[in-house]
Image: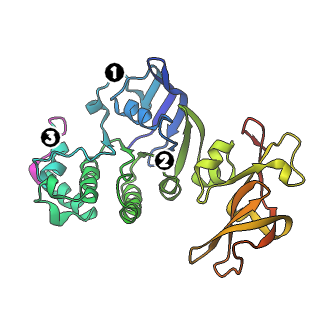
Amino acid sequence: MAEVSLQNLSKSFGDQVALKDVNLTIPDGSFVVLLGPTGAGKTTTLRMIAGLDKPSSGMVLINGQDVANQSPAERNTAMVFQQYSLYPHLSVRQNLAFPLKSPMLRTPDNEITRKVDEVAEVLQISHKLDNKATELSGGEMQRVSIGRALVRSPQIYLMDEPLSSLDAKLRSDLRIELKRIQASLGATMLYVTHDQIEAMTMATHVGVLNQGKLVQFASPREIYENPVSVYAASRLGSPKINILPAELFPNAPNAATQIGLRPEHIRIGEGQAARVGRVERLGDQTRLHLKLGENDLITLTDAHTEFAKGDTLKIAPQSPLYFDVSGDRIQ
């Protein structure tokens, strides 16, 4: 596998800046997730590592080597796209075997059979190997697409929102499976998503991108607990962090204009009066949707709470995060 380093990497399409001066090291054997909304620069980053797009400036280093003059094939990366990208006239077995038949790899037939059977079993599609790709469900087609990457032994796996078009249960199952595969292979994986649950559950490191700039790069827990800005804080957490005027609560720092409260960091029973607008009972816990003056917020309480819509309760901050007028964190 490989360590990948991006040094002052930038990419523009005409007047539109897609990526700006990104410095990032993807450690060997890590599962790195790039997180951000559409247009943040996530896919552009993948494509430049793969060699599908050329940087406007900066360098991509794989194991310390500048790969600017290498073709996508020479970089030995495997990319999984959001869309399935299968050959419809070929069977599942033939689709999985196709990357191994590259003249550069020269994989023996018996080794191709072994790898295809092994990957098909891992992805639970062994019973579909003789089916045409057009005979598969969406979830099965995405498994084959992922399998086409897994049959190889590339330097790095690049995955562009591979689970976004699947239903919730299949997404959950494949999240677990991908993380297990990555850990067992010791693979280096760069995974693009806008889904914070995928980032929290799979990543060893998360890179938060905003309009082409890398805002924060750290473990999911570090970003959740110590975000550098309102933007970074809002990328992780379900329910999302509550961002409120700092003046609503006492003891805020002088420069603070906003206070950030994770739902679990609100004490009930003291402080300011808030009204219950809605109650969501989720089995293991209950979400209370509250109104504090003109501000909406969400907090969590035990599963058997007796609070109901229209009730009034008192709340106070616990482990608050403070932000200045520009949205940057005040330590």
Could you tell me residue 86's position as x and y percent?
A: 20, 46
Question: Is residue 111 visible from the viewing direction of this image?
Answer: no
Could you tell me residue 321's position as x and y percent?
A: 76, 51
Residue 156, by quadrant, is top left
Q: Nearer the viewer, mark 3 or mark 1?
A: 1
Q: Residues within 10 Å of mark 3 (few under 14, many from 20)?
A: few
Which residue does the numbered mark 3 point to in the structure image? 106
Instruction: Find the distance from the CA under tag 2 to the CA under tag 3.
Output: 37 Å
Q: How many marks?
A: 3
Q: Callout 3: helix, strand or loop?
A: loop
Looking at the rendered image, the quarter that the C terminus falls into is top right
Q: Amino acid at mark 3?
A: Arg
Instruction: Find the distance from the CA under tag 2 to the CA under tag 1.
Output: 31 Å
Instruction: Find the distance from the CA under tag 3 to the CA under tag 1.
Output: 23 Å
Give the magenta-colored segment's residue range: 103-110
Q: Residues within 10 Å of mark 2 (few under 14, many from 20)?
A: some
Residues at badges 2 and 3 in contact (C-beta under 8 Å)? no
Which residue does the numbered mark 1 point to in the structure image? 69
Residue 330 is left or right of residue 133, and the answer is right
Q: Between disc 2 and disc 1, whose residue precedes? A: 1
- Seen as rendered, the residue at the extreme front is 310
Examine the residues drawn in magenta and state their main secondary structure: loop
- Give the residue drawn at x 72%, y 77%: 307
* Of residues 169 and 96, the one drawn nearer to the viewer in this rendering: 169
The mark found on residue 194 in the picture is 2
Q: Nearer the viewer, mark 2 or mark 3?
A: 2
Q: Residues within 10 Å of mark 1 (few under 14, many from 20)?
A: few
Could you tell me residue 22's position as x and y percent?
A: 54, 30
The colour scheme is rainbow
Q: Amino acid at mark 1?
A: Asn
